[in-house]
Image (cartoon, helix red, strand yellow):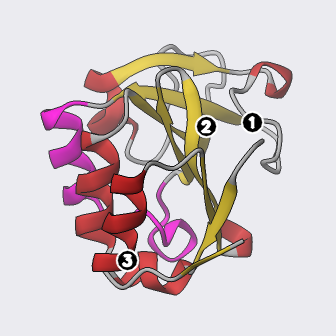
Amino acid sequence: MSDRIYLNYDDIVKEESVVVDYLVKNSDRFSVTAVIKRPYSQLPPDFNYGVQLQPFVENYIFERKDWLVNFLGYMRHQIMVVCRCCKESRKQLLLMPNVFLPIDNDIPEDICFYRNGKLWFATISHEKIAFAVDVTKADLTFFKENGIKSYI
């Protein structure tokens, strides 16, 4: 990936609502990883907050080799859920507990955002890592104005 910048995870957690608002408004879709519940063959799959996300789901990706990104960890019965970004999905994400603290809140993990079909903002929840790729001047201004430290 080119032009990757890392973002201070604690800053993102602290500013979660403004960050989520910005990310959804400036992305086409987002993805999360979720551990599905029995029965594993059920469609749509059952996972925490699955009902809330279901209206926005574009795809459930069951095979890790088919995930949109290759840097995320994997657990048994874990899937990637790809959702469209829209006003309603933004509202739903903001109603959920802090999406950047999934372990604390028992919600889907590793939220990533895509712009023009390409990853541009990613989190690796367990490691508390966040980064952005091919950021625009507007993105950099947003991060700076909201006190989100970035580094290369």
Q: Along the horizontal axis of the image, is 53 left or right of 105?
A: left
Please report the bounds of the magenta region as a residue range. Answer: 86-107
- What label sits on residue 144 in the rendered view? 3
Can residue 74 be seen at all in this image of the molecule?
yes
Task: State the SS at label 1.
Answer: loop
Circles 2 and 1, Cβ within 8 Å, touching? The answer is yes
Q: Which residue is mark 2?
A: 36
Q: Along the horizontal axis of the image, is 90 left or right of 120?
A: left
Question: Toward the viewer: 118 or 63?
Answer: 118
Residue 18 pos. (x, y %): 23, 67
Task: State the SS at label 3.
Answer: helix
Corner quadrant of residue 16? bottom left
Label 2, label 1: how far apart the Cα atoms are = 6 Å
Bin the neighbour count of mark 3 within 10 Å (Cα to Cα): few under 14, some 14-19, many 20 and up.
Answer: few
Q: Along the horizontal axis of the image, is 30 left or right of 34?
A: left
Q: Residue at x 28, y 78 (%)?
A: 145
Task: State the SS at label 2.
Answer: loop
Tell me the kind of residue under disc 3: Lys
Corner quadrant of residue 109? bottom right
